[in-house]
Image: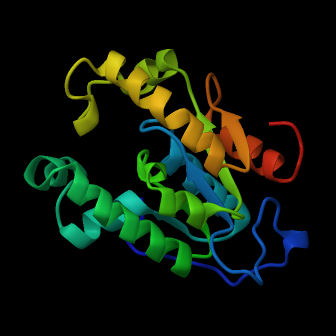
């Protein structure tokens, strides 16, 4: 993850697979999805393939606050974190022209979903078995502190329709390597089957 925004000179849509409209500005690809789905890993791979910068709004928050997200949740509560997240997303969409990854709960905010409208947004999906395999659901994730498997299912039931609403394409990550997911995102944004 990068703490500072990076960007490369805009390319034309013709030579930028999956890219957004450079004349419009904003990120070339935005990744959304649940915690642990691999947005950071896939985002870095996409940025490399597209020859552009990578930015993660969770990393922006950590850098600005000087503390981990779990500490923000514990010390200030989820509502305060969501305020920080809204501002981080708004700033990143306005400033960053590369690949952008959003935190898992960023789409909870209606204003954020509206801000993403018209952008090349890819929802990276996975089922609970894949989540268990990848992160064990026992890592330092504040929303999964108690009964993580059940809580993950509850979060996904609430968030899946919002991810789908905000996304231009949906890419399943189950059983795929990060490289395969990155390729599928580009193919999906180009209109090929994901």
Residue 136 appears in the rendering: yes
Q: Residue at x 72, y 64 (%)?
A: 118
Q: Which of 154 and 54 is in front in this view?
A: 154
Q: In this view, does 51 lie above or below 101?
A: below
* Residue 13 in the figure: left or right of residue 137: right
Q: Which residue is drawn at 80% across and 45% down?
A: 188
Q: Residue furthest front?
A: 110
Q: Which of 156 and 48 is in front in this view?
A: 156
Q: Is residue 131 above or below residue 54?
A: above
Position of residue 155 measured from the top left corner of the image (x, y, whole percent): 40, 30
* Residue 161 in the figure: left or right of residue 14: left
Q: Residue furthest left?
A: 75
Q: Residue at x 30, y 65 (%)?
A: 84
Position of residue 74 measured from the top left corner of the image (x, y, whole percent): 11, 46
Scheme of image coloration = rainbow
Q: Residue at x 80, y 36 (%)?
A: 194
Badge count:
0
Please identify the quarter of the rendering in which residue 100 is found.
bottom right
Please identify the quarter of the rendering in which residue 169 is found.
top right
Position of residue 114 measured from the top left corner of the image (x, y, whole percent): 58, 62
Residue 141 appears in the rendering: no
* Residue 67 in the figure: left or right of residue 63: left
* Residue 143 in the figure: left or right of residue 128: left
Quadrant holding the N terminus: bottom left
Q: Nearer the viewer, residue 95 or 114?
A: 114
């Amino acid at each position: 993850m990068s703490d500072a925004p990076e960007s490369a000179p805009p390319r034309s849509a013709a030579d930028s697979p999956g890219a957004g409209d450079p004349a419009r500005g904003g990120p070339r690809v935005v990744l959304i999805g649940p915690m642990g789905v691999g947005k950071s890993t896939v985002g870095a791979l996409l940025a490399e393939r597209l020859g552009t910068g990578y930015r993660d709004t969770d990393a922006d928050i950590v850098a600005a606050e000087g503390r981990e997200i779990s500490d923000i949740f514990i010390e200030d509560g989820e509502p305060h974190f969501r305020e920080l997240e809204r501002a981080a997303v708004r700033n990143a969409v306005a400033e960053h022209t590369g690949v952008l990854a959003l935190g898992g709960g960023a789409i909870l905010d209606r204003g954020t979903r509206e801000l993403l409208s018209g952008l090349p947004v890819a929802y990276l999906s996975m089922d609970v078995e894949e989540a268990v395999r990848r992160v064990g659901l026992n890592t330092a994730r504040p929303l999964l502190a108690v009964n993580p498997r059940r809580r993950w299912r509850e979060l996904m039931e609430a968030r899946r329709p919002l991810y789908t609403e905000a996304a231009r394409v949906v890419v399943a990550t189950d059983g795929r390597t990060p490289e395969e997911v990155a390729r599928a995102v580009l193919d999906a944004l180009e209109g090929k089957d994901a």
